[in-house]
Image (cartoon, rainbow, N blue to C red):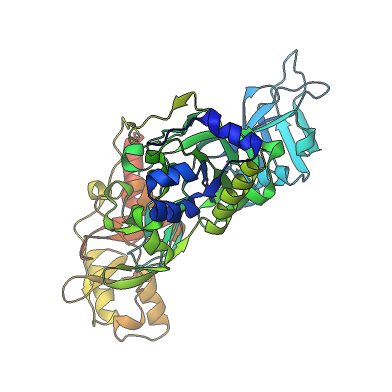
Amino acid sequence: MVEKTVQEINQKIKDGSVHVVTAEQMTGIVEELGPEDAAREVDVVTTGTFGAMCSSGAFLNFGHSDPPIKMQRVWLNDVEAYGGIAAVDAYIGATQLSESRGMEYGGGHVIEDLVARKSVHIRAVAYGTDCYPRKNIETEITIDDLNQAIMLNPRNAYQRYNVATNSSDRTLYTYMGTLLPNYGNATYSGAGVLSPLYNDPDFETIGRGSKIFLCGAPSYIIGEGTQHEPQNDFATIMVTGDLKEMSREFLRGAAFHGYGATLYVGLGIPIPILNENIAKKTGISDADIITNVLDYSSPRRSRPTLRKVSYEELKSGTIELDGKEVRTSPLSSFFMARKVASTLKHWIEQGNFMLSQPMEKLPTDTVFGPMKQTKETPLVKDVMSRKMITIRQGKSVEDAAKLIMRGQSTHLPVTSEDDRLIGIITAWDISKAVAQGKYDKLDRTMTRRVITATLDEPIDVTARKLEKHNISALPVIDKDGKVIGMITSDDISRLIAKRNGCHPQAPLEGKQ
């Protein structure tokens, strides 16, 4: 039986006799020697991850101006930071967006600019008091002008991530990247074999006060992260470190198209090999780490698990879904995760990084629950009209015009012989076809890529689709793609008016 202490390992670090390997190397060592001999051979295993960690940010102290100001609202490079802390303190979150540049620039980019020693424009306003009479200020600062710049990330280093794909016929823009239609791709994140929390899943050595690598600087775990759910292998940690000591090499602002800003964070945790049980756990491989493939085209609460896959499969570049070979692509960088683990290994070997005994272990029994909602969100099935007219594929534009006039509707779903939705034609489409002298079959006139809704879809999601695509109605389809109703912008307007106690006039007939 092998037994070591953190103090004994730290003494080896001091005298230069410590044996450190990365988690990637440890897999082969445990496989070759077995857990007991691996525990005798290895003292520390280093881990690493480098990915988009939206739940990140920094506390900044600007110092007092003359005359002084109590910042009510503050912007850095036109990105608003939270100022409701004290007179000249603010917290900038990684996902907060620029008010002028929108989704292309946000808090993560500001943090990167500060770490890169770039000049950042500060603008603040206040209401003015006797002790803080100033009402506005504009200035330029660098990170060295700040009294403190403290990174504090509420949720980092997810133990694992679900895989995202998209079965619908339209592109989705998500925090898991761009998801192409019809299973066009599958995206994933996390470092697999190098995952810090997968190498000590029972948190025998990881907890409050553990010393870690964060963006190129020695830092610490504060405790469990938000949404910490170890029972389902979704553990997280809350971390902090001195932003002034961090390196741009391990910290990058980024923007996901159609989603917004984030911050790529390099994080590594050293695992002291105190016994053979810990050695066995650090011998995990990509083949051992299993996660779920989810269809992100479905509402979150009913999102189906299509299958389970290993990180070994994901890293191969393709997985099979519904009989189709689907390309996989990582949102995180395994190259940089490996660099984090290697850099931390070097620090320890050089005697520049000592291990710390956690003051308190992370909890292992917490579960992430949904938000309590005291008001039920209306669903499409609560609002939609089930009385709608459809037209069969193969009919003419003239046939469609007659149906639209008879049904007093401006939208006509086009269906196949088995009632599946294959297109849609509107009064506008018909007017355009008539103007161009096209009276033949619908195929040349109808829209084939139809934006749709489902029965259990929240109304606010539907409203977002209408706004995003500049349309006024959506066919409602079931799981087989059959048309079962229609929901329009007028339906949603009437619902909002009813909830607000208003009584709007009925819409004009045929109005889009």
The residue at 55%/54% (across/down) is: 338
Name the spot of residue 366 as percent of width and height, x first: 34, 31
Name the spot of residue 295 as percent of width and height, x first: 32, 58
Seen from this angle, which residue lies furthest left? 418
On the rendered image, what quadrant is the C terminus found in?
A: bottom left
Up the image or down, 334 lies above or below 150; here it is: below
Viewer-proximal residue, 34 or 407?
Answer: 34
Res 60 visible: yes
Seen from this angle, which residue lies furthest top? 130
Up the image or down, 66 lies above or below 290; here it is: above
On the rendered image, what quadrant is the N terminus found in?
A: top left
Name the spot of residue 6 as percent of width and height, x first: 52, 30
The residue at 50%/27% (across/down) is: 358
Q: Is residue 476 left or right of residue 250?
A: left
Q: Residue 333 sits in which quadrant?
A: bottom right
Name the spot of residue 184 as percent of width and height, x first: 39, 69
